[in-house]
Image: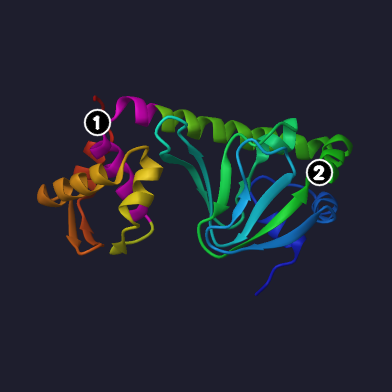
Amino acid sequence: MQFTTAQVLARCPLFAELSEADLEALAGVAHRRRLEAGQPLFMAGEPAQGLAVVVSGKVKVYVISPASGREVVLAMEHPYNTVAELVSLDGGPYPASAEAAEDSEVLWLEQEGFQRLLKARPEIALHLMTMLGRRLRRLVALVEQISFQEVVHRLAAYLLSVADEGVPFVLDTNGAIAAQLGTVPELVSRNLSRLHAGGAITMQGRTVAKVDRKQLGEMANAAGR
């Protein structure tokens, strides 16, 4: 079933509680864009062009370290999540890059039209501020993890989050996991083996067949470098 633009917006946490009239107004400044896997949505430093809502697929938001060239994934946005709320509000350049992690479709809310709506309908701006507050909390948590936790602790937390969607599950590539944890593939590989040997997970190839939630939880909550 394909939802209309207004129906997609109604399922987006940022806009879900808005009135039908507000949703229709937002739909009036939106159009659909299809992206192939790996295709950029925007690049860090580019001027603001709009706000995206994921309709299908996944969109990866990331930054590249200028010193090492290493990619750090800030968010992996799934259907009905928004991308680039900050620039839609302040009009500044994109602080991070975004690309389709797989074949995807997004709603693109054009910047100028969206800005007009924020001025005309302040309740939309209030919802946007709430979402930005949640994003800030998530980014602070990411900084804390990278600063104070070893890779094995971050990996344990990652595995728990994936396990919440169901076990068994197939692991992403070590490179993709490393990008989300702020580390390198070699350390992901080493610590997966460590967790498997310790019984925290049972692996069959790239499939995690079993998890010990208690052990993973204890490791995820541990700190220290």
In the displayed structure, would residue 35 be above or below residue 160?
below
Q: In the rendered structure, does residue 103 fall within the stretch colored magenta?
A: no
- Residue 27 screen position, x and y as percent: 80, 56
- Residue 178 screen position, x and y as percent: 34, 45
In the picture, the disc for residue 114 is 2
View extreme (left): residue:
197
View extreme (bottom): residue:
1
Give the residue number, with chain letter if any, for mark 1. Answer: 222
Magenta span: predominant SS is helix
Give neighbour class at mark 2: few <14, some 14-19, many 20+ (Cα, 10 Å): many
Where is residue 141, by image quadrant? top left
Region in magenta: 144-164
In the displayed structure, would residue 199 be above or below residue 5?
above
Residue drawn 66% across and 56% down?
11
Q: In the rendered structure, does residue 156 fall within the stretch colored magenta?
A: yes
Residue drawn 73% across and 30% down?
90
Q: How many marks?
A: 2
Residue type at tag 2: Phe
Which quadrant: the C terminus? top left
**Res 157 seen here:** yes
Q: Secondary structure at mark 2?
A: helix
Q: Relative to the observer, which residue lies in front, 87 or 213?
A: 87
- Residue 97 screen position, x and y as percent: 57, 43
**Res 161 seen here:** no
Q: How is the image coloured?
A: rainbow
Where is residue 111, by image quadrant? top right
